[in-house]
């Protein structure tokens, strides 16, 4: 998350723009889900700009934010990495993909049956989602998303996984300290890394 609606809008537009370039430059159809990750990250920030404008609450923008943040990446990332992987690498990616399917199903059920709330806290927004066994679900989410990237055969995707893992740790630490989140910067870096992956030699 960024520091204001304007910051989210600017960062989201820039990241989504990188996503458009990634999708336009993709050479193989099976690389399209990974190439579209910056579009997903950019859309997430643009939706959060709407959450800022609404002053938080539990409206449609908050629900859309939660869908893009929670079940969608848990399914999208591991399946996209699996699809893009070379045949010899795919065997080790089935585990994160299976965990992602289960995690996404649990998260989707929670979002469909429980309210999602957002509260503006100075320069950050706090989101509330009632998820049972939250530590276990979080472990599944990280295994599916970061695990798939870190197990990828392509070194650029492994670097992307490492950068996003570091970003998640830093953002979590800063959130606990009530400082502004740095997620915008990590989304931008991640998008540039995906662009480098798309432009790799065939």
Image (cartoon, rainbow, N blue to C red):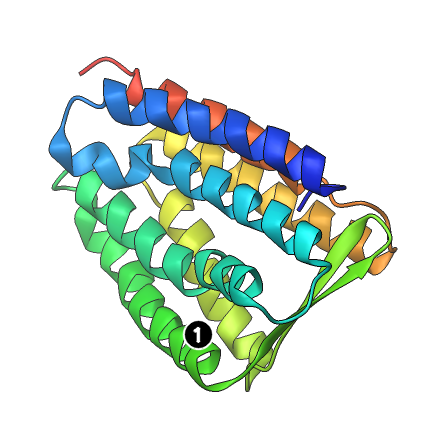
Q: Nearer the viewer, residue 101 or 111?
A: 111
- Residue 138 at x, y = what percent? 54, 69
145 vs 67: above or below: above
Q: Nearer the viewer, residue 201 or 22?
A: 22
- The residue that disc 1 covers is 107
Is 167 situated left or right of 157 in this image? right
- Residue 147 at x, y = what percent? 42, 53
Total labels: the figure holds: 1
Q: Is residue 85 at all visible to an observer of this figure?
A: no
Q: Is residue 165 at all visible to an observer of this figure?
A: yes
Q: Nearer the viewer, residue 42 or 61?
A: 61
Q: Which residue is located at x 35 percent, y 25 percent?
A: 20
- Residue 57 at x, y = what percent? 68, 69
Which residue, as the protein is rendered here, is positioned at the far front? Answer: 54
Q: Which residue is located at x 71 percent, y 40 percent?
A: 182
Q: Give the class, few, some or many, for how many residues have Cα within 10 Å of label 1's Cα (few <14, many ≥20).
A: many
Q: Of helix, strand and loop, which one carries label 1?
A: helix
Q: Which residue is located at x 14 percent, y 27 percent?
A: 28
Q: Quadrant of the C terminus?
A: top left
199 vs 50: above or below: above
User: Which quadrant of the structure image shows residue 104?
Assistant: bottom left
Which residue, as the protein is rendered here, is positioned at the far top? Answer: 201
Is 143 situated left or right of 10 in this image? left
- Residue 137 at x, y = what percent? 50, 75
141 vs 24: above or below: below
Is 125 situated left or right of 139 in this image? right
């Amino acid at each position: 998350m960024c520091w204001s609606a304007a910051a989210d809008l600017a960062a989201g537009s820039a990241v989504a723009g990188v996503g458009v370039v990634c999708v336009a430059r993709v050479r193989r159809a099976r690389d399209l889900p990974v190439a579209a990750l910056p579009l997903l990250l950019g859309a997430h920030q643009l939706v959060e700009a709407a959450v800022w404008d609404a002053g938080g609450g539990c409206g449609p923008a908050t629900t859309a934010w939660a869908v893009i943040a929670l079940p969608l990446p848990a399914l999208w990332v591991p399946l996209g990495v699996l699809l893009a992987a070379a045949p010899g690498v795919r065997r080790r990616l089935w585990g994160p993909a299976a965990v992602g399917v289960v995690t996404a199903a649990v998260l989707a059920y929670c979002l469909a049956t429980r309210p999602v709330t957002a509260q503006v806290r100075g320069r950050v927004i706090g989101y509330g989602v009632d998820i049972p066994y939250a530590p276990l679900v979080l472990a599944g989410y990280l295994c599916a998303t970061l695990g798939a990237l870190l197990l990828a055969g392509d070194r650029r995707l492994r670097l992307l996984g490492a950068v996003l893992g570091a970003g998640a740790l830093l953002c979590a630490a800063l959130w606990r300290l009530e400082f502004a989140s740095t997620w915008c910067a990590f989304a931008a870096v991640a998008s540039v890394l995906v662009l480098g992956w798309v432009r790799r030699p065939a």
